[in-house]
Amino acid sequence: PPLYIITPTYKRPEQLAEITRLSHTLMLVPNLTWLVIEDAYETNDLIEDVLRKSGIKYYYMVAPMPSEYKAKTKGPKPRGVSNRNKGLEWIRQNAKTGVFYFADDDNTYDLELFQEIRFTKKVSMFPVGLITKAGVSSPIVKNGVFSGFYDGWIGGRKFALDMAGFAVSVDFLLNRPQASMPFKPGFEEDGFLKSLAPFEPKEAELLAANCTKILVWHTQTKKNEPSLSLDMSKYNNSNLVMLKK
Ligand code: UGA
Ligand code: MN
C-alpha cells in the first residue's frame, strides 16, 4: 500500500538542514509520497531544490498559521496545525488507499517504522523516544492488550500520544469526512484522534513489537541565532574575511 508522509515545516536557520536530513531518510522508503507543507504564504526555492534533488515523489504546498495565533505573544502556539490540515485535505482529494503519517521535520525515524505502519488497517500506535522527562511516550501493553498511555503529560487526554506516535489508514480517514486537527496547543493529537470517532484506543494496532521498540525519536535541534541565513547567496563570498584565531 502507498505511504503518505505529511511534514509541516517553517522558515528558520535550521530548516534546510532538517529537510535535507529527513529527505535522506525518506529516499530509502519505497512507494512513498511526501507532502511537505510550509507555514508561510509562499514556498521557498531552497527547500524546493532539496525536494527535487531527492528524487522522492513530493508535493510542496503552503498553509500559513492563521494570524490570530501567529500574533500571540504568550503561551504555546498551534504549531504545524494548518500544515497538517492542508495535508489531510490533499489526501481526501488525491488518495484512495494506503496509510498516512505525520512526520515533523526534526524527528529521527528508523526505516523499520515505515515498514510497520504501511499495513495499518485503522489506526496504529507505537512508542516515541526522547520525549519529556519521562523519556518515552507509549501505549502501555499488558499481555498483548492495550491498557492505557504512558506519557510525561497525560493532561486528561483520551489519546495521550505524541504526533509521531500513530499512523492512520487512508480509507479510515475517507470514511470520516469531518476529521481534522484542532488549533489547540497540547491537544492536537488528542483532538485529531477523537475526530476519527467512532474509534477507541483499545482498537489501535500496537506496532513495534507490542510497543517494546523505539522506532522514532523526538529529537530537537539546537536553535541558532534567528537572523542567521544559511543561504550562501546572501553572503557576498569575496567579502568574507578570515577571522583571527
Ligand atoms: C511537540 C510535539 O512533540 C510534536 O509531536 C507536535 O507536533 C508539536 O509539539 C506541535 O506543537 O505540534 P516540538 O518539537 O515541540 O513538538 O515542535 P516543533 O518540532 O517545533 O514543531 C512541530 C512541527 O510543526 C515541525 O514539523 C515544525 O517544522 C512545524 N512548525 C513549527 C510550523 O509549521 N510552524 C511553527 O511556527 C512551528
Ligand atoms: Mn520537534
Image: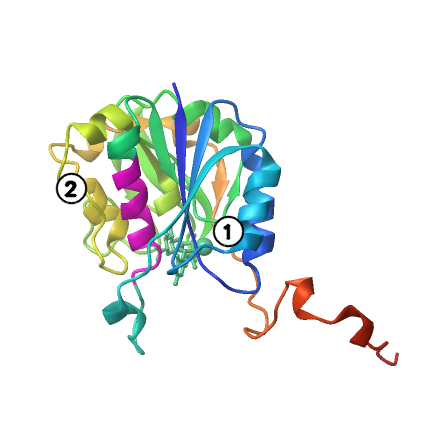
The location of residue 186, given as percent across then percent down, is 28, 58
Closer to us: 165 or 195: 195
The location of residue 153, given as percent across then percent down, is 30, 56
Q: Quadrant of residue 234?
A: bottom right
Instruction: Establish if 25 lies above or below 107.
Output: above
Closer to us: 233 or 220: 233
- Tell me the crowding category of disc 1: few under 14, some 14 to 19, or many 20 or more residues within 10 angstroms, Cα based: many
Give the quadrant of ligand 1: bottom left
In this figure, what is the number of numbered marks? 2
Instruction: Establish if 4 lies above or below 115.
Output: below
CA separation in Å, label 2 and label 1: 26 Å
Asked which secondary structure carries label 1, the reply is loop
The location of residue 119, given as percent across then percent down, is 36, 20
Q: Which residue is mark 1?
A: 106
At a point 38% along the width and 58% down the height, the residue shown is 39
Classify residue 44 as left or right of residue 192: right
Dot 1 beta carbon under 8 Å from ligand 2: yes
Q: Amino acid at mark 1?
A: Asp
- Mark 2 or mark 1: which comes first in sequence? 1
Q: Which residue is mark 2?
A: 195
Instruction: Establish if 218 lies above or below 115.
Output: below
At a point 55% along the width and 67% down the height, the residue shown is 223
